[in-house]
Image: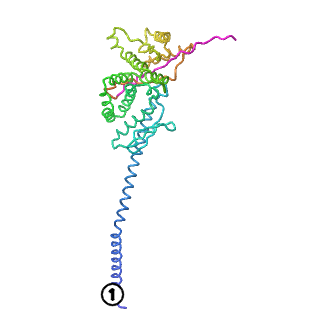
Amino acid sequence: MGNEQMASLSNYFIGGTIGASLLVAAYIIIKFLKDLPAIQAGLKTLLIFFRWLGASTERAIIKNDIESKVNTFVARIGKDVINKNLIKYRIKLKWVVASEANKALIKNGDVVVRLNYDLDNRANLINSLSVYLDESLAPNFKFIADDDYWCSSKYVIMQEFSLNSGPAYFGYFSQNYLRPFMSASPTLKDVYDKMVKLNDNGVFYPVLLNEYESLGTLYFGRFVPPFVKRELENFLAFLFDIETVDEYLAAHGSKPPLDFNSQFIKVGVVLVASPEQESFEPHKQRVLICFKRGATRVYLTGWAERNIDGLRSITADLTATGDYAVIGKPCFFELKNDGHGGEGRRPKRNRGVCYAIKKLPAKVNRPH
């Protein structure tokens, strides 16, 4: 076979291969065009799946972040309370549709908060805390209190949390919760401002809420007589006068009383701001006077390292007699800046402590 024949045969095969390839390509294109709607539907489904996966992942991350922040905050509050039933549950968050949102229930030792996801994460965090507190905060106190007192307590906690979370979160809380609440009634603002002052000075959790919850325990599930609500009001005013002693002294010409002896709340409060004549003995004597006047509990509170040492010394002397005991564990706190002015905290040297002391039943000498 000659070279010309070989070249001709080679060209024939190349042409046939190209032709066959073009036919296959044409077939594939025709087939693709015929199946294009199905392919487009498949791609659309795949895109929807990846969008769902991304949104689900984002919501799971936000959910875990909210649970972590709220539970960490609640754990810290737990160190500031004497009555551990004041706020003891952890939060579990569940995303639901709007019609099922803003509800909570206690399940397996957790408060399960049902919330509708919001594109504004400030709303997710602050709203979840609000629903959580509605279910978990001081349930006995909530039963006996007017909205003025219980909601003010709740908002004091929400304010502290939002300030700790950052200016944007405090702005959302202020606009959507605090301002509408405060504008509803002048008395609400007065109650709220007094509670903020008590929280700034470290007695909101261990003293005020502890006594409110204890009082609520007496009446939970029963008729609440009007004087109980007056007792809540008078006790708040009593603590506020102590915490604003300079203003009280200027207005009345004397210091406020340190014992509150009503029908149910019978307590004394002794502040240890500095030793007198290099001794804490006068403070111990004030504790004893409160008990003699009928107090069932005396709260001994102070700040700065030297005074905290004095508090330990006083409680040690009292418990050593066998007539007195410390209720629970001491509550440590930090004095805060003005509740409306900023989110910072004062230096560590202004950390304080609060002891709750009770008098034990009198010992009875029995014959052998």
Q: Is residue 345 magenta?
A: yes
**Camera-nearest residue between 356 and 180:** 180
What's the residue type where badge 1 is placed?
Ser
**Camera-nearest residue between 8 and 327:** 327
Locate residue 236: give its quadrant: top left
Residue 122 vertical placement versus 365 (above, below): below
Q: Secondary structure at mark 1?
A: helix
The tally of labels here is 1
Q: Is residue 299 visible?
A: no
Indicate the position of residue 187 as horizontal and vertical percent values: 33, 23
Could you tell me which quadrant the N terminus lies in?
bottom left
* Residue drawn where x is 35% and y is 82% of the image: 16
Q: Which residue is mark 1?
A: 8
Residue 281 vertical placement versus 342 (above, below): above
Residue 57 vertical placement versus 133 (above, below): below
Q: Is residue 206 magenta?
A: no
Locate residue 172: give its quadrant: top left
Residue 311 vertical placement versus 59 (above, below): above
Residue furthest to the right: 368
* Residue drawn where x is 36% and y is 21% of the image: 194
Q: In the picture provided, is 9 more to the left or to the right than 368?
A: left
| Part of the protein shown in magenta | 344-368
Classify mark 1: residues with Cα within 10 Å, few (<14), some (14-19) or many (20+).
few
